[in-house]
Amino acid sequence: MEKLIHNFLEYLELIGKSKRTISEYALDLRVFLSFFGGQHSPDLALLQSLQRKDIEKYTYYLKNVRQNTAATRCRKISSLKVFYDFLIRENLVHKNPVNDVAKPKKPEKLPKYLTLEQSRILLDVISGKHQSRDLCMLTLLLNCGLRLSELTGLNLGDISSLDTPGQAFMRVWGKGGKERILFLNSACVQAIQQYLPVRKTRDPGETALFLNAFGKRIGNRTVQNMVRSYLQQIGLGKGYSVHTLRHTAATLLYQYSHADILILKNILGHSNVSTTEIYTHLGSHQVRKVLENSPFVTKKE
C-alpha cells in the first residue's frame, strides 16, 4: 500500500498538481485509509470492494466526527475521486465508487476585498529599505490579481517590452504549470522600472524578479508577512492577506473597468468561469446594500 501511495503522489506531480495540492491529497488519503483500516493499512482487496454506501459512511464520519467544513469535505472527496481514477488507470480497480457520491454544498461566502480608496492608502504606506520592491509587488498584486506563488515565481525573463509604450507584458505560470500572458498597464510598468535599478544580488545567475534581503528569490512566507504588516498599518487585520489583494484586483476590475467575465477569467487564470462569477455576486451584493439604504426605507429607531 505504501508503494501504491508513493506511485499515486508521483502521478499527481506528473499531471502538474502543485506541491501544496499533493501534500493535501496525501493527508486526505491517509485519513481515508485510516478510517477503513483502523490500526492496519487496508489492502487492495478492500479498496476494490468499497461501494458508494461505504464512501457515504466515510463522508458522514468527516462531517460528524472530524467536524470538517463543507469546503474541506469537498476537497477530500475530490482527492479520493482522483485516487480511484488513478487505480482504474493502473487496472487495479474497475469502478470508481466516488463518482455517484454527492459533494456537500458549500455555503456562499463572499470574499473580503479592499475598496479602491483602501487600496490607494495601502500603496501610500509602503516604506522602508525595500520600498521599491514592496511597492512593485503590491502594484502587480492589485492590478493583475496574481496568486502568491505566481508573484514569487516571476523571473526577469518573464517581463518584456517595458520600454515600448502600450506593449509591455509578463508571462505568468499558474496552477498546473499553465501559462498566461498579462499586459502591463502604466502603473505596473512604472513600478517595475523603479524597482529594477535597486534589485541587488550577489549571484549574477539569479533569475528571480523579486529578491529577499540575501539576494535570493523571495519566499511566500516573506511576502505574506510583508503584506500582512502593511495591511495592519491601515487598520485591516484578521481575515486580510495576500489573497485578499487578488480578490481586490478582480473586484475593482469588474466594478471600475467593467471587465467582461470571460476576460476576467483569463486575467485570473481560472480554469472554469463559475469560479470567476463570484465577482458578479459581489456586484449584486453592493447593489442590494445601496437599495437598502434608500431614503424611502423606514429606519428603525
Image: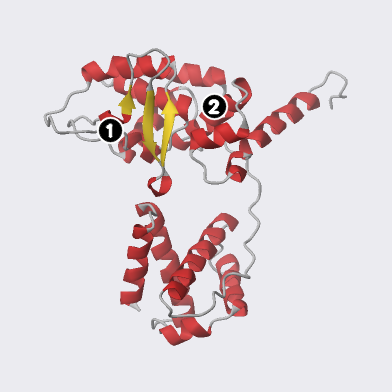
Q: Position of residue 193 (x, y in %)?
A: 30, 16
The answer, for residue 210, to whether it is visible in the render is no
**Quarter-of-image position of residue 7:** bottom left
Total labels drawn: 2
Q: Are marks 1 and 2 in contact (CB under 8 Å)?
A: no
Query: Is residue 13 found left or right of 120 in the rendered image?
Result: left
Return the residue at label 1: 155
Is 159 drawn above or below residue 162 in the view shown? below
User: Foreground: 86 or 56?
Assistant: 86
> Which tag, 1 or 2, sits closer to the chain's start?
2
Return the residue at label 2: 114
Image quadrant where one finds the C terminus = top right
Dot 2 surroundings within 10 Å: few (below 14), some, or many (20 or more)? many
The answer, for residue 74, to whether it is visible in the render is yes
Image quadrant where one finds the N terminus = bottom left
Question: Circle 2 — which element?
Answer: loop
Question: Circle 1 — which element?
Answer: loop
Query: Is residue 152 found left or right of 87 in the rendered image?
Result: left
Query: Is residue 95 found left or right of 179 in the rendered image?
Result: right
User: Foreground: 188 or 130?
Assistant: 188
Identified at 47% across, 75% down, the residue is 88
